Image (cartoon, rainbow, N blue to C red):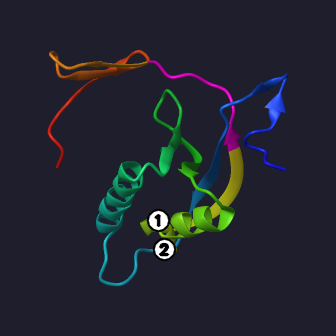
Amino acid sequence: MDTLNRPSEGKVRLREQCYICWMTPTDKPPPAGTTEAQIRAAHFDYLRELERNALLFAAGPFFDENGERHGAGMIIIRAKTRAEAEAIGCREPFTAAGMRTMTLTPWQRNEGSLNLRIRFLDGVVEIDDRTYALSAPD
C-alpha cells in the first residue's frame, strides 16, 4: 500500500517520507591525525551539502532554554528508501569517525505549517517569526 498517498478523512494528504537519524555521542576520540574541530567542520559541510541537495529536512542538537544539552542530536533526512537514508546517515562525519552512533527511525511528515516571506528590496527572508539577512552564496 502506498502510505504516502493513502486517503485520510476522504482527502489525500501531502505526506512526505523522511527518516530521523538519532545521533548519540560515543566516548571514542577523533581518528589519529584528526581533531574534533576538523570533524565538526566536515559535519557542517556535509549538512550544507545535504541541504543544497534538498535531502535535509532539519537537524540539530537537543538544548533547553538554559543551554543544557539533552542526549542525542537529530538529523531528519528526505529519502526514498530506508537503505538510502541509512547510507546518508552513516556518511555523516561524526558517525563515520565512530564518534557517534546512529539509530534510524522512519517518519512521515503529515501535518504542520511554515510561513515564508522573501523581501527582495530589504534582502531578508522571514520564516515564521524569524528574519534572516540574505547574502551571496559561498
Provide residue 40's location: percent of width, then percent of height. Answer: 35, 60
Query: Residue shown at 35%/67% (left/top)?
Result: 39
Q: Amino acid at mark 1?
A: Glu
What residue type is disc 2 on? Ala
**Mark 1 Cα within 10 Å, few/some/many (few <14, many 20+)?**
many
Q: Which residue is mark 1?
A: 92
Span highlighted in magenta in the image: 108-115
Q: How far is disc 1 from disc 2 in space, using C-alphas?
A: 6 Å
* Magenta stretch encompasses residue 58: no
Element type where label 2 sits in the image: helix
Q: In the shown orientation, is residue 121 left or right of residue 92?
A: left
Residue 77 in percent (x, y) is at 55, 52
Is 38 drawn above or below residue 6 in the view shown?
below
Q: Which residue is mark 2?
A: 96
Q: Residue furthest bottom?
A: 32
Residue 129 in the image, given as x and y percentages of width and height = 41, 15
Say whether residue 31 is left or right of residue 3: left
Most foreground residue, 23 or 87? 87
User: Most prominent secondary structure in the magenta stretch?
Assistant: loop
Estimate the x, y position of residue 56 in percent, counting from the top left: 47, 49
- Which of the two residues, 42 or 123, is positioned nearer the viewer here? 123
Rate crowding at label 2 as few (under 14), some (14 to 19) or many (20 or more) other CA atoms within 10 Å.
Answer: some
Q: Quadrant of residue 123?
A: top left
| Mark drawn on residue 100 | none
Give yes or no for contact between labels 1 and 2 (Cβ–Cβ under 8 Å). Answer: yes
